[in-house]
Image (cartoon, helix red, strand yellow):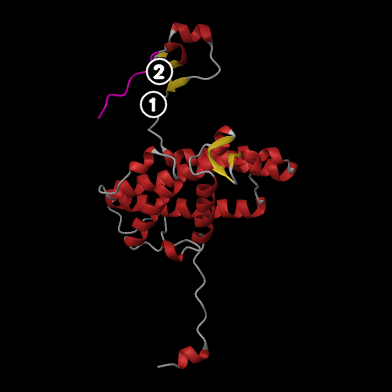
Amino acid sequence: MAKIPPAQDPKYHFDMWKGAEPEFVGLDPSIYYVENYNGQCGYAELTTDFSGAVDLIVEEYSRSELGNWVAPLAHMSRQLIELHLKALMEAIACKDSSFDVKPLGGHKLMAIWRPCLDWIIANGYRISEDSRLSMTRGIIEAFDAIDPGGDLFRFGISRRSAFDKQKSYDRVGISLPKFKQELDAFRGLISHWEATIFREKLALEMGWANDPYFDADDFPKTAIPAISEAEQAAP
Protein backbone atom coordinates (compact mmCIF):
# COMPACT_ATOMS: atom_id res chain seq x y z
CA MET A 1 0.00 0.00 0.00
CA ALA A 2 1.30 3.46 -0.91
CA LYS A 3 2.36 5.61 2.01
CA ILE A 4 -0.08 8.40 2.77
CA PRO A 5 1.76 11.74 2.66
CA PRO A 6 1.56 13.73 5.90
CA ALA A 7 0.02 17.17 6.25
CA GLN A 8 2.58 19.78 5.31
CA ASP A 9 1.24 23.00 6.80
CA PRO A 10 1.04 23.19 10.63
CA LYS A 11 -0.89 26.47 10.45
CA TYR A 12 -4.10 24.52 9.80
CA HIS A 13 -3.47 21.39 11.90
CA PHE A 14 -3.17 20.83 15.61
CA ASP A 15 -3.25 18.03 18.16
CA MET A 16 -5.99 18.02 20.83
CA TRP A 17 -3.59 16.93 23.60
CA LYS A 18 -0.28 18.36 22.41
CA GLY A 19 -1.80 21.70 21.51
CA ALA A 20 -1.44 24.01 18.55
CA GLU A 21 1.68 25.02 16.69
CA PRO A 22 2.72 28.67 17.12
CA GLU A 23 1.71 29.34 13.49
CA PHE A 24 -1.83 28.12 14.24
CA VAL A 25 -2.18 30.37 17.29
CA GLY A 26 -1.16 33.39 15.30
CA LEU A 27 -3.37 32.60 12.31
CA ASP A 28 -6.59 31.62 14.13
CA PRO A 29 -8.03 30.00 10.93
CA SER A 30 -11.75 29.73 10.20
CA ILE A 31 -11.40 26.04 9.23
CA TYR A 32 -8.80 23.60 10.52
CA TYR A 33 -7.96 19.93 11.04
CA VAL A 34 -7.58 18.51 14.54
CA GLU A 35 -6.30 15.19 15.87
CA ASN A 36 -9.06 14.46 18.41
CA TYR A 37 -8.29 10.75 18.98
CA ASN A 38 -11.76 9.63 17.91
CA GLY A 39 -12.22 6.33 16.14
CA GLN A 40 -11.91 6.45 12.37
CA CYS A 41 -15.22 7.43 10.78
CA GLY A 42 -16.36 6.57 7.27
CA TYR A 43 -19.23 6.52 4.81
CA ALA A 44 -21.86 5.26 7.28
CA GLU A 45 -21.17 7.98 9.84
CA LEU A 46 -21.12 10.71 7.20
CA THR A 47 -24.58 9.74 5.93
CA THR A 48 -26.02 10.91 9.26
CA ASP A 49 -24.55 14.37 8.80
CA PHE A 50 -25.64 14.70 5.18
CA SER A 51 -29.14 13.43 6.03
CA GLY A 52 -29.60 16.30 8.46
CA ALA A 53 -28.44 18.82 5.85
CA VAL A 54 -30.72 17.38 3.16
CA ASP A 55 -33.72 17.47 5.48
CA LEU A 56 -33.12 21.15 6.21
CA ILE A 57 -32.87 21.97 2.50
CA VAL A 58 -36.08 20.03 1.78
CA GLU A 59 -37.82 21.95 4.57
CA GLU A 60 -36.65 25.30 3.21
CA TYR A 61 -37.46 24.37 -0.38
CA SER A 62 -40.96 23.31 0.68
CA ARG A 63 -41.47 26.62 2.47
CA SER A 64 -40.09 28.94 -0.21
CA GLU A 65 -40.93 26.98 -3.39
CA LEU A 66 -38.12 28.89 -5.08
CA GLY A 67 -36.62 27.16 -8.09
CA ASN A 68 -33.05 28.01 -7.13
CA TRP A 69 -33.16 25.37 -4.37
CA VAL A 70 -33.09 22.62 -7.04
CA ALA A 71 -29.32 22.41 -7.52
CA PRO A 72 -28.34 22.47 -3.80
CA LEU A 73 -31.02 19.90 -2.95
CA ALA A 74 -30.13 17.61 -5.85
CA HIS A 75 -26.39 17.90 -5.19
CA MET A 76 -26.67 17.13 -1.48
CA SER A 77 -29.15 14.32 -2.11
CA ARG A 78 -27.00 12.70 -4.76
CA GLN A 79 -24.01 12.89 -2.42
CA LEU A 80 -26.10 11.32 0.34
CA ILE A 81 -27.19 8.49 -1.96
CA GLU A 82 -23.59 7.84 -3.00
CA LEU A 83 -22.43 7.75 0.63
CA HIS A 84 -25.18 5.32 1.63
CA LEU A 85 -24.37 3.00 -1.27
CA LYS A 86 -20.66 3.08 -0.46
CA ALA A 87 -21.42 2.28 3.18
CA LEU A 88 -23.43 -0.73 1.99
CA MET A 89 -20.58 -1.85 -0.27
CA GLU A 90 -18.10 -1.56 2.59
CA ALA A 91 -20.35 -3.62 4.88
CA ILE A 92 -20.57 -6.38 2.27
CA ALA A 93 -16.80 -6.33 1.75
CA CYS A 94 -16.24 -6.70 5.50
CA LYS A 95 -18.26 -9.91 5.42
CA ASP A 96 -17.07 -11.19 2.03
CA SER A 97 -13.42 -10.46 1.31
CA SER A 98 -13.85 -11.57 -2.32
CA PHE A 99 -16.40 -8.82 -3.02
CA ASP A 100 -15.10 -6.32 -5.58
CA VAL A 101 -14.91 -2.82 -4.09
CA LYS A 102 -13.35 -1.04 -7.07
CA PRO A 103 -16.53 1.08 -7.55
CA LEU A 104 -15.75 2.79 -4.21
CA GLY A 105 -13.13 4.77 -6.07
CA GLY A 106 -15.69 6.32 -8.44
CA HIS A 107 -18.99 8.16 -8.38
CA LYS A 108 -21.22 5.99 -10.58
CA LEU A 109 -24.28 5.09 -8.55
CA MET A 110 -25.39 2.08 -10.58
CA ALA A 111 -21.85 0.66 -10.57
CA ILE A 112 -22.07 0.55 -6.76
CA TRP A 113 -25.75 -0.37 -6.42
CA ARG A 114 -26.03 -3.27 -8.90
CA PRO A 115 -23.33 -5.55 -7.45
CA CYS A 116 -24.52 -4.80 -3.91
CA LEU A 117 -28.11 -5.72 -4.71
CA ASP A 118 -27.02 -8.85 -6.60
CA TRP A 119 -24.87 -9.98 -3.68
CA ILE A 120 -27.60 -9.35 -1.11
CA ILE A 121 -30.16 -11.34 -3.10
CA ALA A 122 -27.70 -14.14 -3.93
CA ASN A 123 -26.85 -14.54 -0.23
CA GLY A 124 -30.43 -15.07 0.84
CA TYR A 125 -31.31 -11.71 2.39
CA ARG A 126 -34.98 -10.77 2.08
CA ILE A 127 -34.48 -7.41 0.41
CA SER A 128 -36.83 -8.38 -2.44
CA GLU A 129 -39.64 -8.38 0.13
CA ASP A 130 -38.80 -4.86 1.31
CA SER A 131 -41.62 -2.55 0.20
CA ARG A 132 -39.12 0.31 -0.18
CA LEU A 133 -37.16 -1.43 -2.93
CA SER A 134 -39.17 -0.07 -5.86
CA MET A 135 -38.82 3.56 -4.76
CA THR A 136 -35.15 2.99 -3.94
CA ARG A 137 -34.53 1.73 -7.45
CA GLY A 138 -36.50 4.66 -8.82
CA ILE A 139 -34.41 7.41 -7.24
CA ILE A 140 -31.06 5.70 -7.93
CA GLU A 141 -31.94 5.10 -11.58
CA ALA A 142 -33.22 8.67 -12.00
CA PHE A 143 -30.05 10.23 -10.60
CA ASP A 144 -27.91 7.85 -12.64
CA ALA A 145 -29.74 8.80 -15.84
CA ILE A 146 -29.78 12.56 -15.22
CA ASP A 147 -26.36 13.00 -13.59
CA PRO A 148 -24.30 9.84 -14.17
CA GLY A 149 -20.95 11.51 -13.59
CA GLY A 150 -21.95 13.51 -10.53
CA ASP A 151 -20.95 16.83 -12.10
CA LEU A 152 -24.28 18.37 -13.13
CA PHE A 153 -25.34 19.72 -9.72
CA ARG A 154 -21.82 20.11 -8.37
CA PHE A 155 -20.71 22.48 -11.12
CA GLY A 156 -24.00 23.56 -12.70
CA ILE A 157 -23.00 22.35 -16.16
CA SER A 158 -22.29 18.72 -16.99
CA ARG A 159 -19.93 17.19 -19.51
CA ARG A 160 -22.96 15.18 -20.68
CA SER A 161 -25.58 16.39 -23.13
CA ALA A 162 -29.33 15.98 -23.69
CA PHE A 163 -31.54 17.28 -26.49
CA ASP A 164 -28.37 18.27 -28.38
CA LYS A 165 -27.34 20.68 -25.60
CA GLN A 166 -24.87 20.48 -22.77
CA LYS A 167 -26.76 19.59 -19.62
CA SER A 168 -27.31 22.39 -17.09
CA TYR A 169 -28.91 22.29 -13.66
CA ASP A 170 -31.58 24.90 -14.48
CA ARG A 171 -33.31 22.37 -16.75
CA VAL A 172 -33.85 19.87 -13.92
CA GLY A 173 -37.23 19.62 -12.19
CA ILE A 174 -38.03 18.09 -8.83
CA SER A 175 -41.47 16.85 -7.81
CA LEU A 176 -40.80 17.50 -4.14
CA PRO A 177 -43.42 15.28 -2.41
CA LYS A 178 -42.48 12.25 -4.51
CA PHE A 179 -38.77 13.07 -4.30
CA LYS A 180 -38.92 13.19 -0.50
CA GLN A 181 -40.91 9.93 -0.40
CA GLU A 182 -38.38 8.14 -2.59
CA LEU A 183 -35.40 9.56 -0.73
CA ASP A 184 -36.86 8.50 2.62
CA ALA A 185 -37.55 5.02 1.25
CA PHE A 186 -33.99 4.82 -0.05
CA ARG A 187 -32.50 5.88 3.28
CA GLY A 188 -34.61 3.41 5.20
CA LEU A 189 -33.86 0.46 2.93
CA ILE A 190 -30.13 0.98 2.56
CA SER A 191 -29.64 1.73 6.26
CA HIS A 192 -31.52 -1.41 7.26
CA TRP A 193 -29.66 -3.84 5.01
CA GLU A 194 -26.27 -2.25 5.66
CA ALA A 195 -26.95 -2.62 9.39
CA THR A 196 -28.18 -6.20 8.91
CA ILE A 197 -24.92 -7.23 7.28
CA PHE A 198 -22.76 -5.28 9.72
CA ARG A 199 -24.50 -6.63 12.80
CA GLU A 200 -24.20 -10.22 11.61
CA LYS A 201 -20.44 -9.76 11.73
CA LEU A 202 -20.75 -8.04 15.11
CA ALA A 203 -22.86 -10.91 16.47
CA LEU A 204 -20.13 -13.39 15.54
CA GLU A 205 -17.50 -11.28 17.26
CA MET A 206 -19.67 -10.89 20.39
CA GLY A 207 -20.79 -14.52 20.45
CA TRP A 208 -24.50 -13.64 20.27
CA ALA A 209 -26.94 -16.31 19.18
CA ASN A 210 -29.44 -13.48 18.61
CA ASP A 211 -28.68 -9.79 18.33
CA PRO A 212 -30.19 -8.17 21.46
CA TYR A 213 -30.40 -4.71 19.86
CA PHE A 214 -31.34 -5.26 16.22
CA ASP A 215 -34.03 -7.24 14.39
CA ALA A 216 -33.13 -7.95 10.76
CA ASP A 217 -36.75 -8.89 10.01
CA ASP A 218 -38.11 -5.54 11.19
CA PHE A 219 -38.66 -3.88 7.83
CA PRO A 220 -41.79 -2.89 5.84
CA LYS A 221 -42.70 -5.84 3.67
CA THR A 222 -44.52 -6.00 0.38
CA ALA A 223 -48.16 -6.97 0.60
CA ILE A 224 -48.81 -10.61 -0.17
CA PRO A 225 -51.64 -10.94 -2.74
CA ALA A 226 -54.81 -12.39 -1.30
CA ILE A 227 -55.60 -15.95 -2.38
CA SER A 228 -59.01 -16.31 -3.94
CA GLU A 229 -61.51 -19.00 -2.90
CA ALA A 230 -61.01 -20.71 -6.26
CA GLU A 231 -57.24 -20.84 -5.73
CA GLN A 232 -57.72 -22.19 -2.21
CA ALA A 233 -60.03 -24.92 -3.50
CA ALA A 234 -57.69 -25.93 -6.33
CA PRO A 235 -55.83 -29.21 -5.79
Seen at 43% across and 16% down, the residue is 14
Which quadrant holds residue 155? top right
Seen at 34% across and 49% down, the residue is 92
For the residues labelled 1 and 2, say whether their Cβ atoms are less than 8 Å apart: yes
Seen at 51% across and 77% down, the residue is 225
Q: Which mark is residue 17?
A: 2
Is 131 or 160 nearer to us in this picture?
160
Relative horizontal placement of residue 96, taking residue 171 as reference (left or right)? left
Query: Which quarter shows the N terminus?
Result: top left
Is 31 or 154 nearer to us in this picture?
154
Q: Label 2 amino acid? A: Trp
Residue 217 spot, x, y in % from top left: 42, 62
CA neighbours of label 1 inside 10 A, class few (<14), some (14 to 19), many (20+): few
Does the magenta segment cover residue 4?
A: yes
Residue 71 spot, x, y in % from top left: 62, 38
| Main secondary structure type of the part rendered in magenta | loop
CA neighbours of label 2 inside 10 A, class few (<14), some (14 to 19), many (20+): few
Residue 97 spot, x, y in % from top left: 26, 47
Seen at 40% across and 39% down, the residue is 106
Is 146 or 5 nearer to us in this picture?
146
All told, the count of numbered labels is 2
Q: Please provide the residue range marked out in magenta.
A: 1-8
Q: Which mark is residue 20?
A: none
Q: Label 1 amino acid? A: Tyr
Which quadrant holds residue 20? top left
- First in sequence: mark 1 or mark 2? 2
Residue linked to disc 1: 37
Query: Which quarter shows the C terminus?
Result: bottom left
Instruction: Say if 107 sits above or below 7 in the image.
Output: below
Does the magenta segment cover residue 99?
A: no
Name the element at disc 1: loop
Relative horizontal placement of residue 210, taking residue 47 as reference (left or right)? left
